[in-house]
Every structure is written in C-alpha cells, then in structure tokens.
Image (spheres, grey):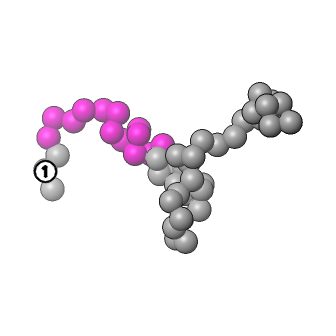
Amino acid sequence: MQNWMEANIKFWPKTFWPPQSPDLNPLDFCIWWHIERQACSVRYKNIWL
C-alpha cells in the first residue's frame, strides 16, 4: 500500500513543513521559500539601505 501511494500520490517533502512552530503553517512556509528563491535567483550589483 505504501509503495502504491508513493508511486501515485504526490506528497510534500519534509522541507515544506516548518520545524514545530506554532506561528507558521505549511502553506506560509512553502510560499516564503518560493519567494526567497525567486528574490535570490538574481545577483544584484549593490544593495545599500
């Protein structure tokens, strides 16, 4: 049964789930990870604040 489920159902990897934080839910964690990946995908010349 487990082999069939793994082959036919897409499960979220462990990295999509936050590490026991009551403030975050899995969707928040997943969304921010994608935003960070997109923002850091471009190398900027300078960032001065």
Q: Residue 4 lies in what quarter of the image?
A: top right
Residue 41 included in the magenta stretch of the image? yes
Q: Residue at x 30, y 32 (%)?
A: 42
Residue segment shown in magenta? 34-46
Q: Residue at x 47, y 51 (%)?
A: 32
Q: Is residue 41 left or right of residue 13?
A: left
Name the image quarter holding the C terminus.
bottom left
**Residue 46 against residue 25 in the figure, above or below:** above
Q: Is residue 42 left or right of residue 3?
A: left
Residue 39 included in the magenta stretch of the image? yes
User: Measured from the top left, where is residue 44 in percent x and y?
Assistant: 21, 36
- Which amino acid lies under the numbered mark 1 shown in the image of this protein? Trp
User: Measured from the top left, where is residue 5 in percent x and y?
Assistant: 81, 35
Q: Is residue 43 left or right of residue 30?
A: left
Q: Residue at x 36, y 41 (%)?
A: 39
Q: Is residue 8 left or right of residue 48?
A: right
User: Measured from the top left, where is residue 35 in percent x and y?
Assistant: 44, 45
Q: Residue furthest right?
A: 1
User: Measured from the top left, where is residue 37 in percent x and y?
Assistant: 41, 40
Name the image quarter holding the N terminus.
top right
Mark 1 is surrounded, within 10 Å at the Cα level, by few (under 14), some (14 to 19) or many (20 or more) other residues, namely few
Number of callouts in the render? 1
Q: Residue furthest top?
A: 7
Q: Residue 41 lies in what quarter of the image?
A: top left
**Residue 16 against residue 21 in the figure, above or below:** above
Residue beneath label 1, please? 48
Q: Residue at x 17, y 46 (%)?
A: 47
Q: Secondary structure at mark 1?
A: loop
